[in-house]
Structures are given as C-alpha cells and as structure tokens.
Image (cartoon, rainbow, N blue to C red):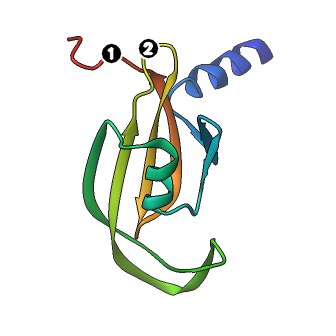
Amino acid sequence: MTRLFVLMLLLMAAGVAHADSFKCGAALVSSGDTRDQVSAKCGNPSDIKRGTAFVPSVAWVNGVPVSAGNTLIEVPVELWLYNFGPTQLMRRVRFESGRVVAIEILGYGYVPGSG
C-alpha cells in the first residue's frame, strides 16, 4: 500500500515543477529580479504573454516582497518563455508589476522553426 501511495505522489509531481531561481550562463535569475535584470542576464525570451491579475497588495523592500494590506489590486502580468534548445529544460518566468514572482521548469526545449 505504501509503495502505491509513493508511486501516486511521484506521478502527480511529474507535471510542471517550480523553482526559486535558475542560471543563465554564469548569471542567476531569482525571485524579485526586474525585467531589465532578467533580460540582461538571459537575453530576449522566446515568447512573451501579457495580461493582468488581481493579487494581494505588496511593497518591495530591498528586493523582498512585504505585505502591504489585505486588499487585492490589479497588476500587469508577463509570462516570459526561455527556450534553451533541445538539450536543456525551458523556463517560464512570471512577472507581476515588473518583478519575478515565479519560475516554472518546463520540458526540454526545441529547435525554433522545427515543426
């Protein structure tokens, strides 16, 4: 029974993974980085999606998010996709109000224009 439970947990976790940071060459991209910092470290993303979301109010103090109340505010959201090619895992970086708030680890990349 325990083996079945562990197997089920592993299968559920096999989807998209989340990370607090990732490396672009020698540079480290982390939560709290700005769009300009990420662009300088990794170059232009393969794809950008833009929208808005309602999130709890946050103030950034020395690169650290601090709760600024219980109200929800509408903020701009950007999802940047980094495709590092078929030998490396892709990353999706979520920006809210111009700061990295989440990094997703996706599947292996692809060769642009290959299908």
Of callouts 1 and 2, the N-terminal one: 2
User: Which of the pair 47/9 is nearer the observer?
Assistant: 47
**Residue contact at pointers 1 and 2, CB within 8 angstroms:** yes
Where, quadrant-wise, is the N terminus in this rendering?
Answer: top right
Q: Is residue 1 left or right of residue 103?
A: right
Residue 29, above or below 16? below
Amino acid of disc 2: Pro
User: Which of the pair 42/88 is nearer the observer?
Assistant: 42
For label 1, the SS is loop
Where, quadrant-wise, is the C terminus in this rendering?
Answer: top left
Q: Residue at coordinates 64% horizontally, 48% vertically from top-left?
A: 20
Q: Position of residue 41 (x, y in %)?
A: 52, 47
For label 2, the SS is loop
Per the image, the residue denoted by label 1 is 111
Q: Residue at coordinates 35% horizontally, 49% vertically from top-left?
A: 79
Per the image, the residue denoted by label 2 is 86
Q: Position of residue 112 (x, y in %)?
A: 27, 20
Q: Position of residue 109 (x, y in %)?
A: 41, 20
- Count of numbered labels shown in the rendering: 2
Amino acid of disc 1: Val
Q: Residue at coordinates 73% horizontally, 20% vertically from top-left?
A: 6
Label 1 crowd bin: few (<14), some (14–19), many (20+), radius 10 Å: few
User: Which of the pair 73/86 is nearer the observer?
Assistant: 86
